[in-house]
Image: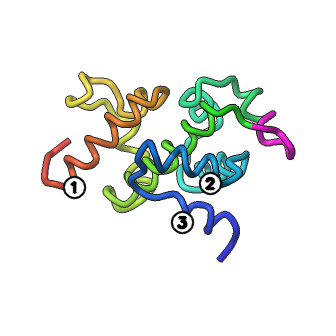
């Protein structure tokens, strides 16, 4: 198993606040997590930087070896990675999940689910919709 595959596998589909805090305390959350997101989805750097409330330049600076992520960025990256894994699991493929994220949706007041991923609350809301879909809701 490659290091990136192991990293992705170690982040659960559903991650609680206490698990996020424990994960950040016990593991090095660094640029590899950005690469994990990129390996699971086809979104460009601009979209990932928008989700993380960073400039593309800052995102790329974080990718440099030895760069330390701020705590809020670590939290956001972990939650995004868990959401993406969950979305792929629910939708059946990364392409299907990417399409769902970028399509206007009635349940999001006509916005795209992806437009809400720049906040922790937005990530949780999108994840709640995925859970509803798992239980039969048409979201």
Closer to the observer: label 2 or label 3?
Answer: 3
Q: Quadrant of the C terminus?
A: top left
Instruction: Find the distance from the CA under tag 1 to the CA under tag 3.
Output: 21 Å
Nearest the eye: 53 or 47: 53
Residue 30 drawn at (x, y percent): 72, 46
- Please, what secondary structure does the residue beneath circle 1 have? helix
Residue 56 drawn at (x, y percent): 71, 28
Q: Characterize the magenta stretch by its predominant secondary structure.
A: loop
Nearest the eye: 65 or 47: 65
* Residue depicted at x 58% and y 30%: 52
- Residue under numbered circle 2: 36
Instruction: Find the distance from the CA under tag 2 to the CA under tag 1.
Output: 24 Å
Q: Quadrant of the N terminus?
A: bottom right
Answer with mark 1 or mark 3, whichever residue precedes in sequence: 3
* Residue depicted at x 31% and y 30%: 104
131 with respect to 54 (left or right): left
Residue 134: mark in rendering: 1
Q: In this picture, is 66 found above or below 11?
A: above
Mark 1 Cα-neighbour bin, 10 Å: few <14, some 14–19, many ≥20: some
* Residue depicted at x 57% and y 41%: 77
Answer with mark 2 or mark 3, whichever residue precedes in sequence: 3
Residue 127's quadrant in the figure?
top left
Q: In this picture, is 83 found above or below 39?
A: above
Q: Which residues are magenta?
A: 61-68
Residue 112 drawn at (x, y percent): 35, 30
């Amino acid at each position: 198993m490659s290091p990136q595959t192991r990293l992705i596998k170690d982040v659960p589909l559903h991650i609680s606040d206490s698990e996020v805090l424990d994960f950040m305390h016990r593991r090095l959350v660094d640029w590899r997590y950005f690469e994990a997101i990129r390996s699971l989805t086809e979104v460009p750097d601009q979209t990932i930087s928008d989700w993380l409330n960073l400039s593309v330049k800052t995102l790329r600076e974080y990718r440099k070896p030895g760069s330390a992520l701020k705590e809020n960025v670590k939290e956001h990256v972990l939650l995004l990675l868990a959401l993406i894994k969950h979305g792929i699991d629910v939708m059946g493929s990364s392409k299907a999940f990417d399409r769902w994220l970028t399509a206007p949706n009635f349940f999001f007041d006509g916005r795209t689910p992806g437009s809400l991923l720049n906040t922790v609350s937005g990530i949780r809301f999108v994840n709640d919709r995925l859970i509803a879909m798992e239980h039969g809701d048409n979201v």
